[in-house]
Amino acid sequence: MVIEFALAGLGLVILLLAGDVLVKGAVNLSLRLGIPALIVSLTVVAFGTSAPELLISIKSVLDGVPGLALGNVVGSNTANILLVLGIPALISGLHAGSDTQRTYMVMIFSSVVFIGLAFAGPITWWHSLVLLSILALVLLDAVRAARAHRREVNGASDEDPDDMPDIEDLEEADPDMPWWQIALYVLLGLIGLPLGADLLVDSSIAIATAYGVSDTVIGLTLVAVGTSLPELATTVMAAIRRHADVALGNVIGSNMFNLLAIIGVAALVGPIPVDPAFLGFDLWVMLAASLVLAPFVFLGLQMGRLVGLGFSALYVTYILYLLS
């Protein structure tokens, strides 16, 4: 089983690196083609950074282990809150900005809709259309809000999309990047993502079989934690530098996107049965973890070290329960 764990780790590394280079290549390609920076940030960057989870979900459905897909999304959302926020809060504390309230409400709404659709499962194409329709409305509203904010701050014209977020606002943007490098990044991303997904999914199935656990549990634990590692590393480094206040907004946006986009797209590939254990426990853990954030979002409470310790302890307890 050492080989299987090594292959799972290799697949995860390939996935994360491929997702990173794909985002860089796709962002710069889109900007070169004249697509406004705002649209790029809301679509290309959002989908690109979630590409590893998306490829894992699609591959899982195609390979007949859809529980891995659902476990990945539900497990990642729980890990994002309790682990990705818990550890940085334990290091230096976190503070929620007032601009997270609107996105937080959308995330809670998306979670409730997702749970309702799960009870009406298996998740199929019509569930997918509901989720993707909500995502489209969210993106359109984000465009409208960003334009309004831009006009208010700079007096920009609503008819001119180039007046909206500058290219410099996108960390991945590089106006001097040559065309050959853009093409290379996109190509490496498109090759690496399915390769990494193949390795991770196949080795996860082997691990699940060897240890007698379901693919759902592997998705909730090994795969979910693995795909949350980049966010965890980013927030931990930001916490060490005392600049982790943006972490809460990033986690809320990521969780919302996971529910609406990843399962929305994966369900178009094939039906996703919902394990009864999800309906009775894991979905409610995800929702409870999301609701725990409410006081910090609406009251502006500080997420201090004690809160970080509590979040981290809850997550470890949850993982131990799943593996017991």
Image: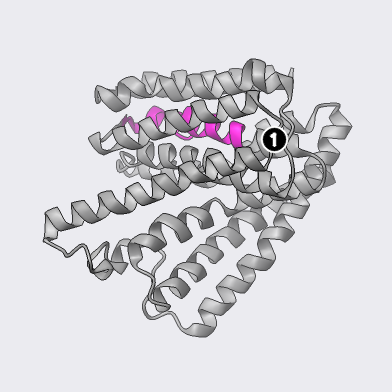
Query: Which residue is at the far front?
Result: 126
Give x and y (percent) for residue 146.
26, 53
Crowding at dot 1, Cα within 10 Å, few <14 / some 14-19 / many 20+, comes out as many
Q: Is residue 76 magenta?
A: yes
**Position of 84 relative to 11 (above/below):** above
Residue type (three-letter) at the residue carrying disc 1: Gly
| Image side of residue 37 versus residue 159, left or right | right
**Position of 117 relative to 291 (above/below):** below
Looking at the rendered structure, the secondary structure element under dot 1 is helix
**Position of 6 relative to 164 (above/below):** above
**Position of 212 relative to 227 (above/below):** above
Query: Which residue is located at x 58 percent, y 44 percent?
Result: 129
Is residue 1 visible to us here? no
Query: Which residue is located at x 41 percent, y 65 percent?
Result: 172
| Image side of residue 114 versus residue 64, left or right | left
Is residue 121 visible to us here? yes
Q: Which residue is mark 1?
A: 219
Q: Is residue 13 magenta?
A: no
Give x and y (percent) for residue 105.
36, 30
- Residue 5's quadrant in the figure? top right
Q: Mostly what secondary structure, the magenta segment? A: helix
Which span is picked out in magenta? 73-94
Query: Which residue is located at x 73 percent, y 28 percent?
Result: 217
